[in-house]
Image (tube, rainbow, N blue to C red):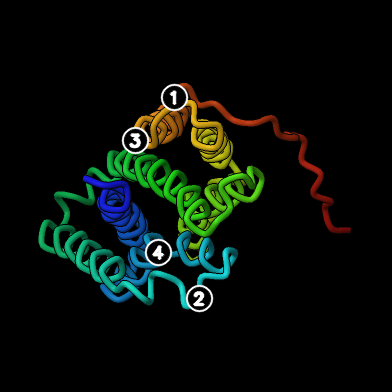
Amino acid sequence: MNLDTLFFALEIVGTVFFAISGAITAVQKKLDILGTVVLGLVTAVGGGIFRDIILGYLPPAAFRKPVYSITAVIVSAAVFAAVYFAGTEIEHHMDRYSLIINIFDAVGLAIFTVGGVEWAHNCGFLNGTYLCVFVGTVTGVGGGVLRDLMAGKIPVILSKRIYALAAIIGALIYQLLTEYKVTGNVTAIVIGAFSIWVIRLLSMAFRWNLPRIKKDFTESGS
């Protein structure tokens, strides 16, 4: 399997996991089937669209290769159907599905972040460390940001459970390993993606958060 085929396979897996994440969020918000499909689709392809706009790859790959959008739509519709026909049986366990969202989201984050860095390399920016890390991070977190905004939530990357930082670290690891040819590309993919996944899971398990100001500065009206 060559590198392009490997990344295509990983992107399909990431698309599936992000679509599930978006669809479950939609179910929790009690959106209809169209809302569920749209939220799943946006979560799955949003980061890639941001990536392509930054790199000047227009129209974005999501529109040139409909396989990603088709996959996201099918997966989102399947999630909606599963919840719709399972009825209250699933509704009683929605707290448990929040954990599933986070696990799927962590896998999608890892895959799309590393894939975003590699996409920047393919566009001729192998030695542009800052650009590659930035593009990788945006690719990983972009879909989740759109998902949260559309669902009426403060984006996860701004509020809790070390998210964007995990993407930045993993993107930087992958960039340095490939830029300086420390390892082969496949090994670099595994190390970069695995580091993101582990950081995300550890941050969820141990409730790691970045420092924040806890004092309430909201002024009461007079």
**At 36% from the left edge and 76% from the top edge, which residue is drawn?**
64
Graded by Cα atoms within 10 Å as few (under 14), some (14 to 19) or many (20 or more), the crowding at tag 3 reads some
Q: Measure the C-alpha gap from mark 1 to mark 2.
A: 37 Å
The reply to whether callout 1 and callout 4 are in contact (CB within 8 Å) is no
| Residue 23 screen position, x and y as percent | 31, 60
**At 51% from the left edge and 57% from the top edge, which residue is drawn?**
142
Single out the mark in the foreground, 4 or 2. 2
Q: In this orientation, which residue lies closer to the viewer: 84 or 122?
A: 122
Residue at image mark 1? 202
| Residue 112 screen position, x and y as percent | 41, 49
Three-letter residue code for mark 2: Leu
Q: Earlier in the sequence, mark 3 or mark 4?
A: 4
Q: Identify the mark at residue 186; answer none if there is no mark.
A: 3
Q: Earlier in the sequence, mark 1 or mark 3?
A: 3
Residue at image mark 4? 45
- Is residue 57 toward the left or the right of residue 5 in the image? right
Q: Quadrant of residue 38?
A: bottom left
